[in-house]
């Protein structure tokens, strides 16, 4: 997998080399079936979950382009960026290394702007988050283009499309023909031009409109105001594609229904519309499809992995939780690590997808958690560097003063650092002798460590448990607490 350099000069030099190398490559058309075959050969996890390419509308998008544009949508909050979105971004980056492609990531901002305004947050709140996402994507794409939807507020809908009124009327007519799942599946064609949809496209619409309950949102009277367009978040997506001359979109099965609706409207109004690459929905940790909307409030943190997860978060979700499915572990190995990981990491994980191995399920979960952390850590570090988040020590409110007093001691901070590093390196808790050896203490100083450890235990920063004949092992406390003291614990590398 191509890695982003940390040096700006190297970024530009690498980008020039790659552009020169692939100058003669063009993104093939869906009709030639070359792109679909290439995608499936590289990224299709199984025959049950193929990658699909749906043709677009019109003739202009079919014209061979030496610098085709492929677009995907990205939510605004990078700490909560899901694998669902991240998988598409990784695929987009891989396409840039195979073909001469201009990747554009459409950063959704409208709803965040409205929500920030409703909560009384300043105008700089959303701009800061836009800046964070752009910095993150630029590091991944080596400074290549990232589109940001810059609509200032919900009143700015009059300039969305020259055909805004026709767009709305067409969409309303089409939605009238699919008021229930039964009507949708039984209808032979849609719109005044009687456009026929395949059974597969109807199924995608059913997921989007009814499984995700988007039909209620689209048709709700609450979404019609004097100044706001009812379907702005659909029509604005069309505007971005028209302005860029997009050749392909990238969507998951859960949200491709929105692009099918746009396609129907384009046919009604004789507008161009690009082809669409459809990726299978990622899985939730329990093994069900991850059909969340992009808003954070719809996420169950224990059912999905996000880029801001620390190793302890990943370990808790994949190893400690009881409802982790074998299908989800397969997804992480097959569709992420084996597709986008380094050669060395892929070799380590080769044994994991094989059901004939003698690994227990518990051991397999531990290995997947470790290898996934090795895979995701470079991207996690980018998020941490941009947002300033760190692994934190968590303490209850009643111990806050004791904790601050304990952390004022340099030796206490060193002890916490050594316990953490030992746990990451050895995957087990530390004994007092091991702690003394790591800190270079002789037997006399070793006895003084007990005083420090008792102080750290008193404020619940460290836990200990007996191990026979008076021996004890120590670990950083992992219980949920009310107040977080932000303090960097040190490296979390494998």
Image (cartoon, rainbow, N blue to C red):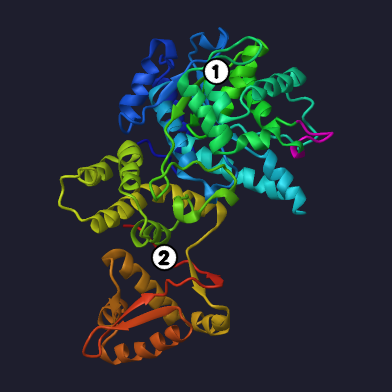
Whether residue 144 is visible here, answered yes or no, is no
Q: Residues within 10 Å of mark 2 (few under 14, many from 20)?
A: few
Say which residue appears at 39% left-offset and 48% top-offset: 376
| Nearer to the camera, 379 or 385 | 379
Whether residue 269 is visible here, answered yes or no, is yes
Please state the extent of the stretch shown in magenta in the rendering.
222-229
Q: Position of residue 197 (x, y in %)?
A: 52, 17
Considering the numbered disc 1 on the image, is that residue within a helix, a strand or a loop?
A: loop
Which of disc 2 and disc 1 is earlier in sequence? 1
| Nearer to the camera, 37 or 95 | 37
Q: Which residue is labeled 1 in the image?
A: 274
58, above or below 145, in the image: above
Quadrant occupied by the C terminus: bottom left
Quarter of the image for residue 53 reads: top left
307, above or below 459, in the image: above
Badge number at residue 490: 2
Quarter of the image for residue 174 reads: top right
Looking at the image, the residue that sits furthest to the right is 226
Q: Residues within 10 Å of mark 1 (few under 14, many from 20)?
A: many
215, above or below 132, in the image: above
Q: Position of residue 444 (x, y in %)?
A: 29, 92
Q: Position of residue 420 (x, y in %)?
A: 37, 70
Q: Is residue 110 left or right of residue 23?
A: right
Work out how far the residue at label 1 is from the one at label 2, CA to CA, in angstroms: 47 Å
| Nearer to the camera, 5 or 262 | 262
Quarter of the image for residue 31 reads: top left
Q: Nearer the viewer, mark 1 or mark 2?
A: 1
Say which residue appears at 43% left-offset and 58% top-offset: 310
Say which residue appears at 28% left-offset and 66% top-offset: 427
Decide whether residue 414 is among the magenta residues.
no
Considering the numbered disc 2 on the image, is that residue within a helix, a strand or a loop?
A: loop
């Amino acid at each position: 997998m191509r890695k982003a350099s940390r040096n700006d000069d190297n970024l530009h030099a690498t980008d020039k080399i790659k552009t020169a190398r692939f100058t003669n490559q063009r993104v093939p058309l869906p009709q030639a079936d070359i792109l679909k075959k290439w995608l499936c050969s590289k990224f299709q996890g199984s025959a049950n979950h193929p990658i699909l390419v749906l043709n677009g509308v019109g003739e202009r998008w079919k014209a061979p382009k030496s610098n085709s544009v492929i677009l995907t949508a990205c939510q605004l909050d990078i700490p909560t960026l899901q694998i669902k979105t991240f998988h598409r971004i990784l695929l987009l980056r891989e396409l840039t290394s195979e073909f001469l492609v201009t990747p554009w990531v459409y950063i959704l901002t409208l709803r965040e702007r409205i929500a920030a305004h409703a909560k009384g947050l300043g105008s700089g709140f959303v701009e800061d988050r836009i800046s964070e996402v752009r910095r993150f994507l630029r590091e991944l794409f080596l400074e290549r283009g990232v589109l940001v939807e810059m609509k200032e507020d919900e009143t700015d809908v009059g300039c969305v499309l020259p055909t805004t009124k026709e767009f709305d009327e067409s969409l309303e007519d089409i939605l009238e023909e699919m008021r229930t799942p039964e009507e949708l599946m039984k209808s032979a064609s849609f719109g005044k031009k009687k456009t026929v949809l395949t059974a597969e496209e109807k199924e995608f619409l059913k997921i989007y409109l009814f499984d995700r309950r988007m039909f209620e949102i689209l048709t709700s009277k609450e979404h019609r105001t004097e100044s706001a367009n009812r379907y702005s978040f659909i029509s604005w997506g069309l505007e971005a594609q028209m302005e860029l001359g997009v050749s392909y979109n990238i969507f998951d099965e859960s949200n491709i229904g929105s692009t099918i609706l746009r396609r129907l409207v384009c046919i009604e109004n004789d507008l161009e519309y690009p082809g669409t690459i459809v990726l299978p929905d990622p899985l939730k940790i329990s093994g069900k499809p991850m059909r969340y909307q992009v808003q954070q409030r719809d996420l169950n943190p224990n059912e999905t992995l996000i880029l801001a997860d620390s190793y302890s978060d990943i370990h808790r979700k994949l190893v400690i939780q009881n409802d982790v499915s074998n299908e989800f572990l397969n997804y992480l190995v097959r569709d992420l690590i084996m597709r986008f990981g380094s050669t060395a990491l892929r070799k380590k994980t080769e044994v994991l997808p094989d059901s004939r191995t003698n690994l227990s399920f518990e051991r397999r979960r531990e290995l997947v958690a470790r290898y996934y952390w090795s895979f995701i850590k470079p991207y996690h570090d980018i998020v941490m560097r941009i947002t300033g988040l760190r692994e934190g020590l968590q303490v209850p409110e009643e111990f806050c003063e004791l904790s601050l007093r304990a952390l004022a001691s340099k030796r206490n901070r060193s002890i916490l650092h050594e316990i953490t590093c030992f746990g990451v390196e050895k995957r087990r808790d530390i004994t007092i002798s091991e702690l003394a050896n790591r800190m270079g203490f002789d037997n006399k100083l070793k006895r003084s460590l007990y005083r420090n450890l008792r102080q750290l235990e008193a404020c619940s920063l460290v836990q200990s448990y007996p191990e026979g004949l008076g021996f004890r092992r120590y670990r950083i406390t992992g219980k949920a607490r009310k107040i977080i003291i932000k303090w960097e614990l040190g490296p979390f590398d494998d």
